[in-house]
Amino acid sequence: MKGQNQVERKPHRSEAEMERNLYRNGTLLARLAVKLG
């Protein structure tokens, strides 16, 4: 319960993490695209 509450009380951090994840996913997709050619 406490863990869930803590996660819900960190909107700014979650947004930053999502942005980083999107950036990382973009780079990963780019690398995969290059590998697939």
Image (cartoon, grey):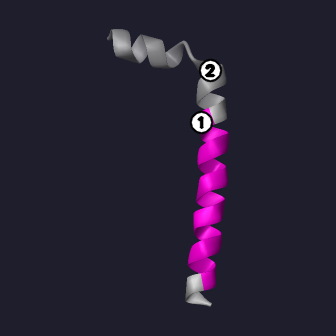
Q: For residue 5, what is the image quadrant?
A: top left
Q: Which residue is mark 1?
A: 17
Residue at the outermost left position: 1
Of residues 2 and 34, the one drawn nearer to the viewer in this rendering? 34
Looking at the picture, does residue 37 appear above or below residue 25? Answer: below
**Magenta span main SS:** helix
Q: Which residues are magenta?
A: 17-34
Q: Secondary structure at mark 1?
A: helix
Instruction: Give me the disc on residue 11.
Output: 2
> Hey, what amino acid is under mark 1?
Glu
Q: Residue at x 62, y 90 (%)?
A: 37
- Residue at 66%, 33% (x, y): give it: 16
Position of 29 relative to 37 (above/below): above
19 within the magenta span: yes
Q: Position of residue 19 (x, y in %)?
A: 67, 42
Q: Does the magenta segment cover residue 9?
A: no
Residue 26 drawn at (x, y percent):
65, 61
Q: Position of residue 4 (x, y in %)?
A: 39, 17
